[in-house]
Image (cartoon, rainbow, N blue to C red):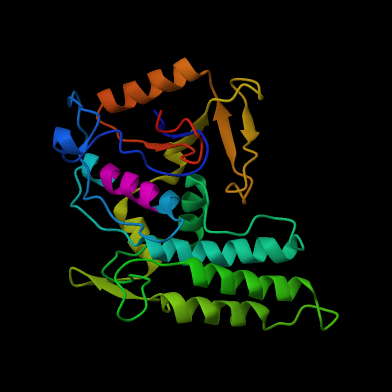
């Protein structure tokens, strides 16, 4: 049976299962734990629009625990850096008629992992020296300026150097990712490390519930964060809830995404 990504809009992991309870006076809501999946510690995306990768990595870390494997801490910034390369190529190819920002969707993580593999946090933090949390505002602005300059095509044709210059900017802000690294005394590449984890990316599906598309069909979600035009399988909202409940009841975790910019989010 396929595991699932339940996706409603932007990407922010809502923490369906709380790792710890806050005192009642600090939290207006009180929850009773009915079913709890194995989870890894909550990470801090800080000043970066990277909830999509923190939630997806958390999901895969939980999947590995469910599969009986040792806990791992996957590098979010390795995925973020690779994603910036892919979206730059897409942006230039489409002559700027595409989204370019920090946001993305959960399926982007799967697509990136297929091409670039995975690395542990211990091998690549993605932070410049003296920094221990992501701060991406300036970096995003610089990267956007580069691709905007490229699509203006001042030379009359694209140079062979534009992507190398772009990656150099990424390296300045995030550091160069490792080609090889060692975990528990064994050397890996990003691809061989991913393969060693035993995760089959074809076992996962993205679900949504929208009334402007037919149910039980695939569609492209029309939001700017879906820059790669990923597909979602549309189901009625009550079935989406049943699917999520069934997954948790059977010991699976899931990625739940929603739009926190909606005025009714905290209502």
- From this view, report whether residue 234 is shown above or below residue 173: above
Where residue 180 sits: x, y (%)?
A: 35, 76
**Residue at image x 44%, y 33%?**
265
Relative horizontal placement of residue 250, taking residue 176 as reference (left or right): left
Quarter of the view holding residue 177: bottom left
Q: Main secondary structure of the magenta part?
A: helix
- From this view, report whether residue 219 is shown above or below residue 144: above
Q: Is residue 230 visible?
A: yes
- Which residue lies most toward the right here? 156
Q: Which residue occupies the foreground of this view, 198 or 16?
A: 16
Relative horizontal placement of residue 114, taking residue 220 as reference (left or right): left
Q: Quadrant of the C terminus?
A: top left
Residue range in magenta is 54-63
Q: Quadrant of the N terminus?
A: top left
Where residue 119 sits: x, y (%)?
A: 34, 65
Where residue 173 sits: x, y (%)?
A: 45, 77
Q: Is residue 61 magenta?
A: yes
- Which residue lies most toward the front here? 25
Label count reads 0
Where residue 186 sits: x, y (%)?
A: 23, 71
Q: Which residue occupies the foreground of this view, 233 or 263?
A: 263
Q: Is residue 256 magenta?
A: no
Q: Which residue occupies the foreground of this view, 149 or 187?
A: 149
- From this view, report whether residue 246 is shown above or below residue 40: above
């Amino acid at each position: 049976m396929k595991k699932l990504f339940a996706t409603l809009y932007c990407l922010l992991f809502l923490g369906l299962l709380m790792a710890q309870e806050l005192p009642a006076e600090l939290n207006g809501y009180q929850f009773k734990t009915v079913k709890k999946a194995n989870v890894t510690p909550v990470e801090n995306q800080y000043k970066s629009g990277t909830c999509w990768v923190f939630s997806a990595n958390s999901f895969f870390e939980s999947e590995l625990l469910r599969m009986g494997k040792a806990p791992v801490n996957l590098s979010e910034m390795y995925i973020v850096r690779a994603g910036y390369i892919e979206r730059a190529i897409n942006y230039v190819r489409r002559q700027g008629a595409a989204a370019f920002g920090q946001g993305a969707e959960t399926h982007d993580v799967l697509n990136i992992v297929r091409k670039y593999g995975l690395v542990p946090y211990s091998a690549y933090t993605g932070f410049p020296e003296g920094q221990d949390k992501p701060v991406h505002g300036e970096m995003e602005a610089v990267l956007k300026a580069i691709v905007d300059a490229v699509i203006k095509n001042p030379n009359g044709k694209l140079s062979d150097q534009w992507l190398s210059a772009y990656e150099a900017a990424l390296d300045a802000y995030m550091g160069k990712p490792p080609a090889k690294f060692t975990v528990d005394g064994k050397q890996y590449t990003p691809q061989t490390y991913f393969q060693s984890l035993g995760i089959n990316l074809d076992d996962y599906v993205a679900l949504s519930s929208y009334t402007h598309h037919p149910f039980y069909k695939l569609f492209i979600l029309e939001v700017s964060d879906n820059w790669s035009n990923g597909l979602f399988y549309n189901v009625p909202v009550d079935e989406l809830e049943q699917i999520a409940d069934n997954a948790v009841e059977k010991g699976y975790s899931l990625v739940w995404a929603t739009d926190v910019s909606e005025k009714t989010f905290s209502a």
